[in-house]
Image: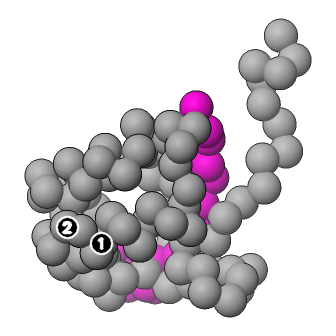
Amino acid sequence: MQHFGLTIDLADDPDLIAQYKAYHANPWPEPLQGLGDVGITDMKIFLLGQRMFMYMTATDEFDPDRDFPRYVEQNPKAAEWDELMRTFQRQVPEAKGGEWWAKMEMVFDLQLHI
């Protein structure tokens, strides 16, 4: 099992943030299925102001550089969802070239210390 932390910002617009939250309260089933198809086993997104944090677990075989593109290439509704969500999102300044959701470094894991 792999664990990932990713971050992105939302547009500085309360109405857009409310819309984004409403979409995630009732997500489309096809993108959810597509996440499982590429090896994502759990995903949680947290919001503070405009900054979002995504915690994700995936199978050992999951490779984000390979499987996120595959997720949208093989699932038209996932591609549509991704395109729609990007209208609400803004890259963080720390994002590397080519990153949309910026990968975060894990600096602590309780399971390694108990």
For disc 2, the marked residue is 75
Residue at the location (54% across, 61% down)? 64
Q: Which mark is residue 108?
A: none
Total numbered labels: 2
Q: Amino acid at mark 1?
A: Val
* Residue in front for this viewpoint, 96 or 76: 76
* Residue in front for this viewpoint, 106 or 59: 59
Residue 93: x percent and y percent?
A: 70, 86
* Residue in front for this viewpoint, 2 or 55: 2
Colour scheme of the picture: one colour
The quarter holding residue 77 reads bottom left
Judge left or right: residue 65 versus residue 78.
Answer: right
Residue most extreme to the top: 114
User: Magenta segment: does it hold 41?
Assistant: no
Residue 26: x percent and y percent?
A: 14, 53
The reply to whether dot 1 and dot 2 touch (C-beta < 8 Å) is: yes
Residue 43: x percent and y percent?
A: 42, 44
Asked if residue 53 shows in the view, the reply is no
User: Magenta region: which residues?
Assistant: 1-19
Relative to 63, does residue 88 appear above or below in the rendering?
A: below
Residue at the location (28% across, 83% down)? 83
Q: Classify mark 1: helix, strand or loop.
A: helix
Judge left or right: residue 38 versus residue 65.
Answer: left
Q: Residues within 10 Å of mark 1 (few under 14, many from 20)?
A: some
Asked if residue 30 shows in the view, the reply is yes
Q: Amino acid at mark 2?
A: Asn
Judge left or right: residue 58 versus residue 7.
Answer: left
For disc 1, the marked residue is 72
Quadrant containing the N terminus is top right
